[in-house]
Image (cartoon, helix red, strand yellow):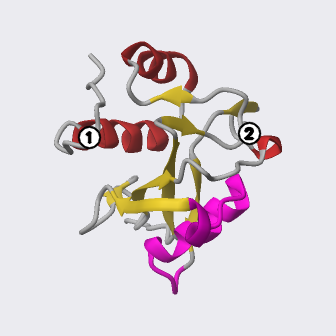
Amino acid sequence: DYWRVEKDHSVIVLAIHENRLVFPNKQYRPGVKVQTLDFAGGRSPTKASPAEAVNGILKRELGIDIEKDVLELYPLNENSGWLINSSFSNQMLFGFVAVLRGTSKLDPTLLHSKSYSINDRNEMNDLLRNELTCVQCRAVLMEYLIQAQQRPEQKVQLVQ
């Protein structure tokens, strides 16, 4: 016998402000009983596309107005989501990148105290090795780093 859990899809947004990854404040996760550092994220309501969920996620978690503050927004996995646990769930993960305008005024009360340079290998290593424990967030960041190698306007070096 097989059973399947129907879940809304996950959406994670990497927010980049002045070449730095910015994060919402750490959140308490009851399942692991600790606060974790995560990118802005949430669920895509059943009747909405993952792209439609991005605006609400950025507004809720970082206080970002997509029309006023976002210079560039693009999906990391445009054609389909990534399977989260295909053995029992239909849930998919969709990753997006929001490049914020340099003039965007971010609310420090909503932000984690540390941001990370996308151009500094040591900072990316520190983030991946010591701070970012959520596997979905790590997957989205790694995909961003891989794709950034192919985007000439980005200076990101792949973490080794």
Q: For this view, does 35 lie left or right of residue 38?
A: right
- Tell how many labels: 2
Residue drawn at point x = 42 percent, y = 12 percent: 122
- Residue 55, picture quadrant: bottom right
Residue drawn at point x = 72 percent, y = 62 percent: 60
Residues in magenta, as a range:
46-69
Whether 6 is drawn above or below 140: the answer is below
Residue 25: mark: 2
- Circle 1 sits on which residue? 148
How far across and down, in percent of the image, does residue 59 sit? Answer: 68, 64
Q: For this view, does 140 lie left or right of residue 8?
A: left
The kind of secondary structure element at disc 2 is loop
- What amino acid type should be assigned to the residue bearing mark 2? Asn
Do the CB atoms of the residues marked 1 and 2 lie less than 8 Å apart? Answer: no
How far across and down, in percent of the image, does residue 120 sit? Answer: 40, 20
The kind of secondary structure element at disc 1 is helix
Whether 157 is drawn above or below 97: the answer is above
Q: For this view, does 84 lie left or right of residue 103?
A: left
Query: How many residues crowd mark 1 within 10 Å: few (<14), some (14–19), many (20+)?
Result: some
Label 1 vs label 2, nearer the camera: 1
